[in-house]
Amino acid sequence: MDYERILVFGAHPDDELTMAPTMAMLAERGVEVYICIATNGSEGYPRPEWRDDIVGMRADEMAAADGIIGTTERIYIGADDMALTNDKPTFQRFIEVIRRVAPDVVFTHGPHDMHRDHLATHAISVEATWQAGSPVSADLGEPWRTPYLLYYKGVQDRPPDIILDVREYAHVRPLTVATQVTQHTLWGTTTTTEKLHAEAERLRASDEPFTNTFWLAERTSLSYLPPLEL
Ligand SMILES: [Zn+2]
């Protein structure tokens, strides 16, 4: 993973934390880590009294997670939660982000999922990664062909192509999840900040394998790429 810049797309604030250990590892090696979140997370309120404040609460939680990961920049597309659509303005915004960041790798959602925003993020980001490389829509920035497109979740029909041992950064996963306080009840009734911090301490002291897994995108979606030799 000899990269200079990576761009990680997520549908909601927190989706990208699946690969938080990988992001933290790369950031520590000097790789610039850009995270682009498609929606504002406005539906992620498990309590009715949080409804009006949830977007701001989640932005604060993201900032806390970024401090742990070492994120270079977090970019918000700002679509309403459960309403991300592959319309022209949204599609062009994705192209703009890819061209500006000019990543060596785009990480995004895979095609197998139930959540509509996850599916939309998958479709838009894959198509935008391809379209960003074409000499069209010059107002959106210099064309950029991203060498690699990987899925970090949302693939259920095949084993991962890359299994990365990130054991030295395993604790980053529970530590960043702990910052997402508004989401703890959605992920499981037993998850608490204290338990997550205890798990982080356990992982920090442990040398057991801890992996992040990735899948190569279908080759037909980026036809300019040479065949990969694995
Ligand atoms: Zn999500």
Image (tube, rainbow, N blue to C red):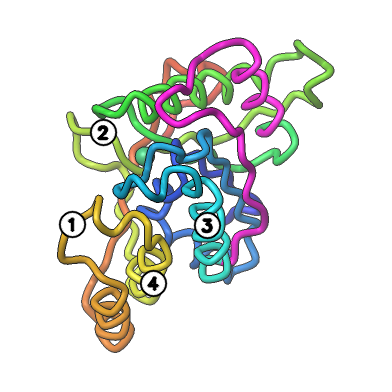
Name the amino acid type tagged 2. Answer: Val
Give neighbour class at mark 4: few <14, some 14-19, many 20+ (Cα, 10 Å): many
Q: Residue 191 appears at what percent x and percent y? A: 22, 66
Task: Tell me the number on the disc at residue 175.
Answer: 4
Q: Is residue 168 above or below residue 99?
A: below
Asked whether 79 falls inside the magenta stretch, the response is yes
Q: Quadrant of ligand 1?
A: top left
Tag 1 residue: 188
Name the amino acid type tagged 3. Answer: Met
Tag 2 residue: 155
Tag 3 residue: 62
Mark 1 near ligand 1 (CB under 8 Å)? no
Name the amino acid type tagged 1. Answer: Gly
CA gap between label 2 and label 3 equals 25 Å
Q: Residue 51 appears at what percent x and percent y? A: 42, 43
* Quarter of the view holding residue 132: top right
From the viewer's perspective, is the residue at label 4 or at label 3 nearer?
A: 3
Q: Which region shows up in magenta?
A: 70-97
12 on left or right of 164: right
- Element under label 1? loop
Asked whether 72 falls inside the magenta stretch, the response is yes
Is any part of residue 7 visible from this angle?
A: yes
Sequence order check: which comes first, mark 1 or mark 4?
A: 4
Report if the CB atoms under discs 2 and 3 are less than 8 Å apart.
no
Give neighbour class at mark 2: few <14, some 14-19, many 20+ (Cα, 10 Å): some
Report the label total: 4
- Element under label 2? loop
Is any part of residue 230 visible from this angle?
A: no
